[in-house]
Amino acid sequence: MSLGRVQFNLMWAAYLAGGGGGVTDGDKGDIIVSGGGTVWTFDSAALLAAILSSGVASNSVTVTCDFGESFTDKAKTVVTGQAWVTADSEIVASVLTPANVDPDEMYLLDIKPVISDLVAGVGFTVTLYSQPEAAGDYDVMCIGI
């Protein structure tokens, strides 16, 4: 799943179960449906606003990971200044789709965020992995739950 045009494969479950959902491809406002109704991409700004206004995610930060100019399969950044982090923190990370980038491109890159090296009262490390090598900067929303 990636926020900021969050890719959500909910419809696969319905499809595999014999449903299909009946949702057509297209821009539905805060949601873009593609893949014959199987991939739902949510507008990150709307989703983030909903999450933050609900009070569910008071511990969050958005950071940038840089794959560099040449294509590579890994980008890493150390996140500091996060007093809310504990040794037991559960942090959900989602890669935001950059402006003017087709959500299908993000789907094909299949960037996977991994959170590691939690340091209580300080921060953590975010590493992005991409099987088909990526280049450039990607913002990652990290939410402590």
Image: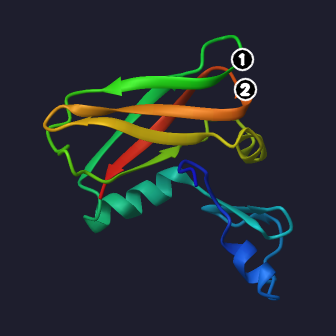
Find residue 109 and report its horizontal and vertical position in percent.
72, 38
Type of the residue with mark 2:
Glu
Judged from the image, the secondary structure of the residue bearing numbered disc 2 is strand
Gap between marks 1 and 2 measured at Cα: 5 Å
Marks 1 & 2, CB-CB < 8 Å contact: yes
Assign the N terminus to one quadrant of the image: bottom right
Residue found farthest to the top = 69
Tell me the colour scheme of the image: rainbow
Find residue 136 and report its horizontal and vertical position in percent.
62, 20
Mark count: 2
Q: Which residue is drawn at 35% across and 24% down?
A: 78
Crowding around mark 1 (Cα neighbors within 10 Å: few <14, some 14 to 19, many 20+) is few
Earlier residue among tags 1 and 2: 1
**In the figure, is residue 81 to the left or right of 109?**
left
Judged from the image, the secondary structure of the residue bearing numbered disc 1 is loop
- Per the rendering, the mark at residue 112 is none
Q: Nearer the viewer, residue 133 or 33?
A: 133
Q: Which residue corresponds to mark 2?
A: 133
**In the figure, is residue 90 to the left or right of 44?**
left
Q: Which of 46 and 61 is in front in this view?
A: 61
Q: Which residue is drawn at 84% across and 62% down?
A: 35
Q: Is the residue 94 above or below the residue 8 in the image?
A: above
Q: Which of 141 and 118 is in front in this view?
A: 118
Assign the C terminus to one quadrant of the image: bottom left
Q: Which residue corresponds to mark 1?
A: 71
Crowding around mark 2 (Cα neighbors within 10 Å: few <14, some 14 to 19, many 20+) is some
Where is residue 99, by image quadrant?
Answer: top right
Q: Is the residue 118 above or below the residue 6 in the image?
A: above
Type of the residue with mark 1:
Phe
